[in-house]
Amino acid sequence: MSLIEITEVRKSFGSTEVLKGINLDVEPGEVIAIIGKSGSGKSTLLRCINGLETINNGSISVAGAQFIDDELHLKALRLKVGMIFQQFNLFPHLTVGGNVILSQTVVKKTPRPEAETMARKMLERVGLGHKFDAYPDELSGGQQQRVAIARALAMQPIALLCDEITSALDPELVSEVLAVVRELATEGMTLLMVTHEMKFARDVCSRVVFMHQGRVHEIGPPEGVFANPKTPELRQFLGVH
């Protein structure tokens, strides 16, 4: 059974249909890059998987649990599927450690000593153990994004959704964040990434999904998708003639 099963998912905002019947199964340990132009539905798809947006039609199941739109089910879903955004969303008045501890104690009701142990461990994992007592405004953008990754990991999700997590960063900081993601991929974390980093998608991902106008337009292993795009839309997107 697939870890995440997305079946005929449709999502509209008002009269605009953004997702037009998406089908995608994600196996445990897969690293999937979702690419495509702005407005093709990539971020909306991630937000639907995480329960931040409700779907109009179709079904999403994570680890065999059907996605049902009520608070209890949504909370259970968000515990299973971590999400990291373009903006780091760290609380400026809390230390780095405090930011990573907070969601564990609030959402999972983890006792604080355990939450702190986990926070220290996950900050070590992203190379920021020494910043436990620092405040977000003392960190670079790349470091803040790595804290956001540590915060998501501290919840021990079975999959991570990454929504353009490097696009708000200065170019020289992108590689340090991607290095962490690459490490997670090596360790077998299931990852779905909306990304513009084509080289990363080519090197690290097991499959690439090209979305176009709300549909999965092409899908396959990176070498096939990048070297041999089958449709004019993907060729145009990749700048291949």
Image (cartoon, rainbow, N blue to C red):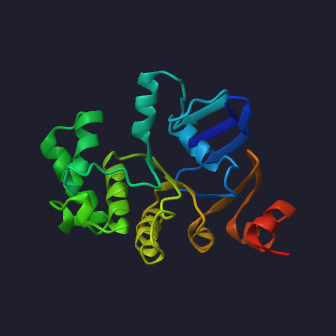
Q: Quadrant of residue 149?
A: bottom left
Depicted 32 relative to depicted 13: above or below: below
Of 195 and 115, nearer the camera is 195
Quarter holding residue 123? bottom left
Q: Residue at x 77, y 74 (%)?
A: 227
Question: If the image is split into quadrants, where does the N terminus sit?
Answer: top right
- The answer to whether residue 2 is left or right of residue 241 is left
Q: Residue furthest left?
A: 113
- Tally the numbered discs: 0
Residue at image coords 48%, 75%? 171
Which of the pair 208/102 is nearer the observer?
A: 102
Position in image of residue 98 (x %, y %): 20, 49
- Give the residue displayed 86% in from the left and 75% down from the top: 241
Q: Looking at this view, is 98 or 160 the one in front?
A: 98
- The x, y position of residue 52, in whole percent, is 50, 36
55 horizontally vs 189: left or right: right
Residue in the picture at 82% in, 60% down: 233
Percent position of residue 38, x then y: 67, 55
Q: Would residue 136 appear left or right of 21 to someone viewing this image? A: left
Q: Is residue 209 left or right of residue 114?
A: right
Q: Is residue 48 above or below residue 231?
A: above
10 shown above or below 224: above
